[in-house]
Image (cartoon, rainbow, N blue to C red):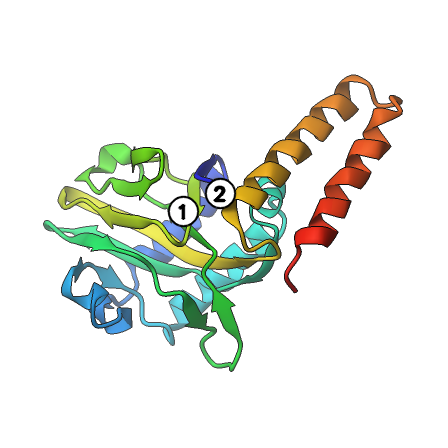
Amino acid sequence: MMLKIPGVLGAEQLRQCRQILEQASWHDGRATAGPVAGKVKNNLQLALDDPAQQRLADFLLDVLGRNAAFIAATLPLRVLPPRFNRYEGGGDYGEHIDNAIFTVPGSQQRVRSDISSTLLLSEPEEYDGGELVVHDSFGTHSVKLAAGDMVIYPGTSLHHVTPVTRGTRYAAFFWTQSLVREDSRRAILWELDNAIQQVAQAMPEHAAVPRLTGVYHNLIREWADT
């Protein structure tokens, strides 16, 4: 399931994030890439032990923990603290699939990358290029979102970022290990959850609401991997 989640960050939150990012020290993004991805990765990234990285990651984890759409779509068990990249001057990231397992910095905890997420921190008119291109069984999808919007997609997807030929593209990116490993099942739960919300708003006293809610939770019991 590929899904856009709009308005994750508001204008003032974006302003504060950009201020930190524009004053931060940036390093070659290949430092955090594996041997295969490192050959096609051409961007800048905040070091994982940089105080700016840690401050922004903690802030975004708090925001995501209160975002109902993100929680409903991903059913998170663990979320790797967000990382931050910068593309400019022709920088790009060639075709790759994300690592299956990541270790949370400073701990022994591991996160399986069921879901990849990119949160844009630059407005689309600030740069040329920089589209996130994701390939799945339904074709090829090119994504260029407003600042503060986020896209999620299966971590198994082949994807790339096109060269940024003008301006600067800032973004946060991270991975989520879901309670429900299979993408097709998460898609079913997402659709069911949205349908329940619509019925509950239109007919809050209808007897179908608690029954459908029960079906939703019973499916999670059946499919959850904890």
Q: CA distance from mark 2 to mark 1?
A: 9 Å
Task: Residue 118 in the image: state x and y as whole percent.
Answer: 39, 48
Pointer 2 and pointer 1: residues touching (CB < 8 Å)?
yes
Q: Residue at x 45, y 68 (%)?
A: 54
Task: Residue 158 in the image: state x and y as whole percent.
Answer: 29, 50
**Eye-nearest disc, 2 or 1:** 1
In this view of the protein, which residue sits in the foreground, 147 or 102?
A: 102
Q: Residue at x 50, y 41 (%)?
A: 8
- Looking at the image, can residue 4 be seen? yes
Relative side of 91 to 174, left or right: left
Say which quarter of the image contains residue 78.
bottom right
Secondary structure beneath label 1? strand
Relative side of 168 to 71, left or right: left
- Looking at the image, can residue 143 be seen? no
Task: Residue 219 in the image: state x and y as whole percent.
Answer: 71, 46
In this view of the protein, which residue sits in the foreground, 50 or 111?
A: 111
Q: Which residue is mark 1?
A: 119
Circle on res. 9? 2
In this view of the protein, which residue sits in the foreground, 30 or 23?
A: 30
| Few, some or many residues within 10 Å of mark 1 (<14, 14–19, 20+) | many
Q: Amino acid at mark 1?
A: Leu
Relative side of 4 to 169, left or right: right
Relative side of 209 to 31, left or right: right
Say which quarter of the image contains residue 172.
bottom left
Task: Residue 195 in the image: state x and y as whole percent.
Answer: 68, 27
Q: Amino acid at mark 2?
A: Leu
Q: Is residue 10 above or below residue 156?
A: above
Q: Residue at x 51, y 81 (%)?
A: 107
Query: How many dots with numbers?
Result: 2
| Few, some or many residues within 10 Å of mark 2 (<14, 14–19, 20+) | many
Secondary structure beneath label 2? loop
